[in-house]
Every structure is written in structure tokens, then in C-alpha cells.
Image (cartoon, rainbow, N blue to C red):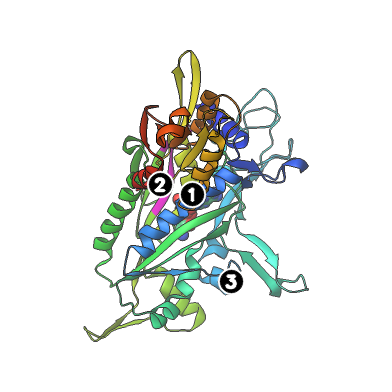
Amino acid sequence: MTDTATMEKLVSLCKRRGFVFQSSEIYGGLGSVWDYGPLGVELKRNVKERWWRAMVHARDDIEGLDAAILMHPRVWEASGHVAGFTDPLVDCKTCKARFRADKLGECQCPQKPSKHPGEHTTCQLTEPRMFNLMFKTFMGPVEESASVVYLRPETAQGIYVNYQNVLQSSRQKVPFGIAQIGKAFRNEITPGNFIFRTREFEQMEMQFFVKPGTDEEWFERWRGLRLAWYHEIGLTPDRIRWHQHGPTELAHYARAAYDIEYEFPFGWQEIEGIHNRGDFDLSRHQEYSGKKMEYFDQAANERYIPNVIETSAGADRVTLTLLVDAYREEQVEGETRVVLGLHPGIAPIKAAVLPLVKKDGMPEVALELYNDLRTHFPCFYDDAGAIGRRYRRMDEAGTPFCVTVDGQTLTDRTVTVRHRDAMTQDRIALEAVAAYVRERLR
Ligand code: GAP
């Protein structure tokens, strides 16, 4: 299977099985905006819940936050986004298309035959000009420059402007962190690759405030913790690597930065950035707001502006990574079996309950089991069609366990549990199913 075919098959599976749909599809879709269907929303929620558990609930030194999307416009001046969150763009006067000037080699000219912009003799590219990626809107009834607000392009700024509030209302002392999951918006010029780069997406960001001088040590510690998280959620370790930003790649706020990259069918790409932001953000907000951002360290009797180590991942991008990593096709008895080999803890449905046949009292026992299991974890009941086809449907949905009620169940109250990956079956007591599955979700 070629890499393009893999992505096409995944996109098709996502639509067919209700993971991801194109936004406003009945109107022809909206460019690079996507909706999550019944299975997709469960999968993405699992990603976010796992992240929240690892970053907030499992640690004493990180607090959660849910800041508003709309913020005072001065925030984006202080952060550098008004002046610097730009991409260089060129327009073609012939075909009227617009391209990233620094990525012409990755763009496609709409004229045929297929070529890059500027390669047809008829192409007339303008000089590059800078284009700000922030979505702008107006607050209140008057559309004037004084009422401009932005849809946030990152969640991080909501954390910086609340850093003193969280510090004062919690019992934290530096070093400590603030974590947040929320929507971000970027008017990307070259979005694409399904939900990899979109215009509306969700970020899972954590800003860790440390004493100046300890930043490099914390930076290394957070690199290790974040890589380990990707192993825990089941990504193939060989398909993950580090990319260190060189001096020309570093964002305006960063002293040092590493990306965690994954090997997608369309190449190695960033899934999370870990940045040493120094005191850039807090100093800028102190300067622009006039409010003190210093921390008073009682033990050392000294004041300083903390340095920030940031971990920044995209919930949609991690969801895509899990889908790509899990997708496989196998030949079983002359037929192609499509499987999403998701980690059981991440899979949208944990168990399916299937009566072998739709008679002889099997559906009744199966429904009773299903109604019990669904109080423990997300389950699915299916009595339609041949058992083999029902297993295949669950393989495609990534469901790790299929519990079948058969003739023997009616005599000895045991069921079979089929494992998605090995396709082997265990026979266990009906009463033991909930504990059996729960044990394997960890
Ligand atoms: N606060 C730092 C920051 O926003 P970034 O590298 O621009 O850094 C961090 O973004 C993460 O957010 C990326 O690693 C990616 O997972 C996700 N992300 C960024 N832009 C995205 C987009 N257009 N679509 C989907 N995810 C995106």
C-alpha cells in the first residue's frame, strides 16, 4: 500500500465508521475544518482525558485552567502575535491562487499539468508579503478598529495572564505548572493532510514556571516525561523521534525547542513542541499590562520573574497520530481484515456484546450483560448479521474485546471473549466479564 493510499483509506474509514466528517459537508464543506462523529469524539475525549490525568490529576505541582477564547487585544500585542505571527504569501495574477512563499515546493499550481507555483510560463507570482494568521472579529455592535478581538491562536496566553491568579488562589510555589485544554484558531495558508493541520483545532498545553537557572534541567525533565506519555498511549516507539530546532527555526519566544515528531504517511511531522520560553512571556505581560509578574521566593528571600517550560500538543493531531499508527490491513482466510489496533485504554468502545444468534434466549442474556457493562465503560450491542461480519465491524472501530453469548452460555453462564489483535478467544464466567475487561484497559 502506498502512503497516499494509506491516508485515503484512513480518511474513508473515518467517514464510514463515524470518526471524522468534513464540516458543513452538505454545503460542499468548509476548508480544513472537521467535525468528530460518535467514535471520533470518544477517541479524542480519551486522548484529552489521558493527558489531563497525566498532567493534572497525577501531579501535585500542576493546576488546571479553562481560560476564555476571547482575550484583551493587548494580550496579542504583548505575546508578539500581532507583529510576528505571520507567513510570507505570494499571489498568482494568472490563476488568482495564493501560496506560502517559503513552501512553494510543497504547493500545487491549479493549472494543468500538475506543477509547482511559478513553474508554468503563464504563472505571474507577486512579491511576498506578510499575512497574519490570527482570525479577527469585532466585539460589540460596532465594526471598528477599537473593537477588534482575535480568536486565540494558542491557549498558552490564557495561562500567562492568569499565572498570578492561580498562584494566589492555590497553594503552589515555584516550580509549578498550569495546564489547559482548549480550542485555538489559525488562518493557515497551507492546511491539509486531513486533521493534521486545520484552521480550528484543540491544544493541550502546559506552562511550567521555574526559577531562572533551573530552566535547562526542567526542560530536559519535561522532554523525558512527554516522550514517555506517547509510549504509554501505545504509539509505535520506532515511529517517534526528536527534532531539535536550529537557530533559524526557533520561535521569537524560545531559548530552546524540541519537537516530538511522528512518521506519518506524508513524512516526519511535529505532534508536540517542548519549549524553553525563558522569561519572555511574563516579562512582556508585565511590560504591556503594567502589573507585576514577579514571584517572591520566601525561602531564598528573593524576587524574580519565573522562566517557563512549555509542553504544547494538538489534541486533533495526537488523535490522527493514533489512527495512523493503529491502522492496518491483514489477510485472513482470503479476505482483507481492516483493524484499528488502538490501545484498549484509548479505544472509543471497550467491548461489544454479541449474541451468537438472534434467538433461543441469547439476545436477552446478551442485553442484560450489555446493560451491566455499559455502567463500567463504553460498550456496543450488536445482533445484526453473521458473527464474523460483526467481529470485522468491531475490528474497524478498534474495539479490543468482543463478548459473545452462545449456546453454552445458556447452560453454564460462560461467554467467549475475542481479542481484536490475536483473534484468540477465552471462555470466562459471565459475572467475570466486567473485571476482565477493566483489568485490560489499564
Ligand atoms: N504555544 C506554543 C504553540 O502553539 P505550536 O508549535 O505552534 O506551538 C503546538 O503548536 C502544537 O499545536 C503543535 O505541535 C500541533 O500539535 C498543534 N497545532 C498547531 N497548529 C495546528 C493546526 N493548524 N492544526 C492542528 N494542530 C495544530
Q: Is residue 140 left or right of residue 119?
A: right
Query: In the figure, is residue 22 to the left or right of 406?
Result: right
Q: CA distance from mark 2 to mark 1?
A: 8 Å
Q: Amino acid at mark 1?
A: Asp
Q: Earlier in the sequence, mark 2 or mark 1?
A: 1
For the residue pair 147 and 119, the one nearer the viewer reads as 147
Q: Quadrant of residue 27?
A: top right
Q: Nearer the viewer, mark 2 or mark 3?
A: 2
The residue singled out by tag 3 in the image is 71
Residue toward you, 378 or 406 = 406
For label 1, the SS is helix
Q: CA distance from mark 1 to mark 3?
A: 45 Å
Q: What residue sits right under mark 2 in the picture?
A: 434
In magenta, the rendered stretch is 263-273
What amino acid is at disc 3? Answer: Met
**In percent of the image, x 42 and y 73: which residue is there?**
282
Secondary element under disc 3, as helix, strand or loop, is loop
What is the spatial separation of the Cα atoms under label 2 and label 3, in whole angstroms? Answer: 46 Å
Q: Quadrant of residue 309?
A: bottom left
- State the residue at coordinates (41%, 41%): 430
Q: Which residue is mark 1?
A: 372
Residue 239, placed above or below residue 273: above
Q: Quadrant of residue 106?
A: top right
Please, what is the three-letter code of the amino acid marked with disc 2?
Answer: Ala
